[in-house]
Image (cartoon, grey):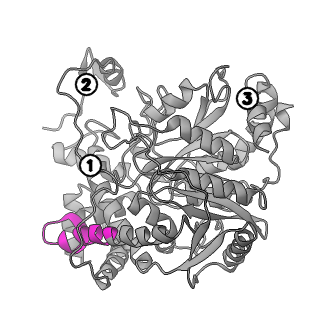
């Protein structure tokens, strides 16, 4: 994969790549992509795509409230709290 | 060995001091745990009463850390317990620690953990395998009666093979994934590593079953029970390390001596299993790991210019190289314009592999292959690059792509290191795996790792 493609992909993946990363990770990514292209040797004409091996139906649960006691435990696990508000870095 | 094995382990609470005197120095050498809390009392009721077990650190256990072996989640403590773990606890088993793993389950050595180093109990200079290396090492070193891992592409079976224990990857969906940190959702399932085959089967029996919290979970529906008679084997199998080749041929001889008919088969799609697996696994990983962004989860930078900058800084500092490589690969294969060429193609190859396996199971009750082409390799060994480790996953990923159950079983020692072989069965036919492995164990038992002992329980 050329550097430009790699940079675009990293941007989409929300990962920052330094110069050293580009060379090191780029080589590993390219090597795997070459391996992926091997799939073209196999004729898959007429085959359906398998998304899940054994799941055939889309199960949903009834649209009704279910009690959960997790809210406090989750809030307590925040790095910084003011009352029940989660403090985040100033990003504006 | 089996009845004694469980009876001895059920002494865990009563003989705590003797256990600790054995286990603490052993754990210092092996390094299987990221969190080790053996100072707990085990319940004295239930099918698994009093049995201590370990849980891979990408599975949630309430009030234990849930790091996934990553800087990203180093400080996370889980507020809830995974369904499968809760079922084991309800049956009387007790969690005594969280085991080391390759970051987010991505790797074959456990050397890609950002938080600890795990050694193979058979040879401390070698890796325990991965990604559930801590779980397999803890089971082999006699630190727990069994350990839970996750198997996305062989992550329970390969370390089980490296450490000389049994490693079960159940049928996809038969064990709830609720509480398991998602990596590749359509491929992965929780599995079990243990020195005891009977206990592995028992633990699976407790864990399995549909869970309202996981909409892909299923109740196992095995077909009419029938004895295993025919075992398919790969025709003209090469590219194995000579020691594994020897163990493989010896296994064939043992199976013949046990009265099984061996049926050579050609799996034409096997060469495409690795590219199809890594295409699908990385695509799903890129979506699943998008949630780690320093906002709802994960490492948070000190400051950021804007929200995008905060997310980028969090992910850049929080993820290791291998995770970044896989996220980028997955992002690439899902990009518009490339999707048909890679992701959709891989899903069609997946269909071809399933069809191929179906043909095998039309003629045979089980398929037997080596678990991995090599024995445990040395830490940082240049003879097995990360790329070569991925290519070597071909025997294990096949079962994940097809969703079928597979069991790695100890098949003897070669030059002092264990070698594992694996049985694969049609969906829901775990019973066949246990039956054949139990018969095989009458000829080759799970090996005792030097320096390990259950004498503390006497």
Residue closest to the eye, A86 or B179:
B179
Task: Residue B355 in the image: state x and y as whole percent.
Answer: 36, 70
Farthest-out residue, top: A83
Q: Main secondary structure of the magenta part?
A: helix
Residue under the point 17% across and 27% down: A63
> In this rendering, does residue B128 appear at all?
no
Answer whether labels 3 and 1 touch (C-beta < 8 Å). Answer: no
**Mark 3 lies on residue:** B10
Task: Give the Cα separation between the discs numbered 3 and 2.
Answer: 44 Å
Task: Give the Cα separation between the discs numbered 1 and 2.
Answer: 21 Å
**Mark 1 lies on residue:** B290
Residue stretch in magenta:
B333-351
Element type at marker 3? loop
Answer whether labels 3 and 2 touch (C-beta < 8 Å). Answer: no
Residue A86 got which mark?
2
Task: Residue B168 in the image: state x and y as whole percent.
Answer: 56, 51
Label 2: few (<14), some (14–19) or many (≥20) C-alpha neighbours in 10 Å: few
Answer whether labels 1 and 2 touch (C-beta < 8 Å). Answer: no
Q: In this view, does B192 lie above or below B270?
A: above
> In this rendering, does residue B278 appear at all?
yes
| Residue B1 found in image quarter | top right
Q: Which of marks 1 and 2 is in front?
A: 1
Label 1: few (<14), some (14–19) or many (≥20) C-alpha neighbours in 10 Å: few
Which chain is mark 1 on? B
Image-based side of B247 in relation to A47, left or right: right
Element type at marker 1? helix
Task: Residue A78 in the image: state x and y as whole percent.
Answer: 33, 27
Which badge, 3 or 1, comes first in the chain's sequence? 3
Task: Residue B209 in the image: state x and y as whole percent.
Answer: 44, 37
């Amino acid at each position: 994969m050329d550097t430009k493609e790699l940079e675009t992909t990293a941007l989409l993946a929300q990962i920052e790549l330094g110069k050293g990363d580009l060379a090191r990770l780029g080589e590993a990514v390219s090597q795997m992509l070459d391996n992926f292209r091997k799939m073209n040797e196999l004729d898959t004409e007429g085959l359906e795509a398998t998304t899940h091996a054994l799941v055939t139906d889309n199960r949903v649960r009834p649209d009704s409230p279910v009690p959960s006691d997790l809210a406090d435990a989750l809030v307590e696990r925040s790095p910084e709290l003011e009352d029940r508000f989660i403090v985040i870095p100033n990003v504006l | 060995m089996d009845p004694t094995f469980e009876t001895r382990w059920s002494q865990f609470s009563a003989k705590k001091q003797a256990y600790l005197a054995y286990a603490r120095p052993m754990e210092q050498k092996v390094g299987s745990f990221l969190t080790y809390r053996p100072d707990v009392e085990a319940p004295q009721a239930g099918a698994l009463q009093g049995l201590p077990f370990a849980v891979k650190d990408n599975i949630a256990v309430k009030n234990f850390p849930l790091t996934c072996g990553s800087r990203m989640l180093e400080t996370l403590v889980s507020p809830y317990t995974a369904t499968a773990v809760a079922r084991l606890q309800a049956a009387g088993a007790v969690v005594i620690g969280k085991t080391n793993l390759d970051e987010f389950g991505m790797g074959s050595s456990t050397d890609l953990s950002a938080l600890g180093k795990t050694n193979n109990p058979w040879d401390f200079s070698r890796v325990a395998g991965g990604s559930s290396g801590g779980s397999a090492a803890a089971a082999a070193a006699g630190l727990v009666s069994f350990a839970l891992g996750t198997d996305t592409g062989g992550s329970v079976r390969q370390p089980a093979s490296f450490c000389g224990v049994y490693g079960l990857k159940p049928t996809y969906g038969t064990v709830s994934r609720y509480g398991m940190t998602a990596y590749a959702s359509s491929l992965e399932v929780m599995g079990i590593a243990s020195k005891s085959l009977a206990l592995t089967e028992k633990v699976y029996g407790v864990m399995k079953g549909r869970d309202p919290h996981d909409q892909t979970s299923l109740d196992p529906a095995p077909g009419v029970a029938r004895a295993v008679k025919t075992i398919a084997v790969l025709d003209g199998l090469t590219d194995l390390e000579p020691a594994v080749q020897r163990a493989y041929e010896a296994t064939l001889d043992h199976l013949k001596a046990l009265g099984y008919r061996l049926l050579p088969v050609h799996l034409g799609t096997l060469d495409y299993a690795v590219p199809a697996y890594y295409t699908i696994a990385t695509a799903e990983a890129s979506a699943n790991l998008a949630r780690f962004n320093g906002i709802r989860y994960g490492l948070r930078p000190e400051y950021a210019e804007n929200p995008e900058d905060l997310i980028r800084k969090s992910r850049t500092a929080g993820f290791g190289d291998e995770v970044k490589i896989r996220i980028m690969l997955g992002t690439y294969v899902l990009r518009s314009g490339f999707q048909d060429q890679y992701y959709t193609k891989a899903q069609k190859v997946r269909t071809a592999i399933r069809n191929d396996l179906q043909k095998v199971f039309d003629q045979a009750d089980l398929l037997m292959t080596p678990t991995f082409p090599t024995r445990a390799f040395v830490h940082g060994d240049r003879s097995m690059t990360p790329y070569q480790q991925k290519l070597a996953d071909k025997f294990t990923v096949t079962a994940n792509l097809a969703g079928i159950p597979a069991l790695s079983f100890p098949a003897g020692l070669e030059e002092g290191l264990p070698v594992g072989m694996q049985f694969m069965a049609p969906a829901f036919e775990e019973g066949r795996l246990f039956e054949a492995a139990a018969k095989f164990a009458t000829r080759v038992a799970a090996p005792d790792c030097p320096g390990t002992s259950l004498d503390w329980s006497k």
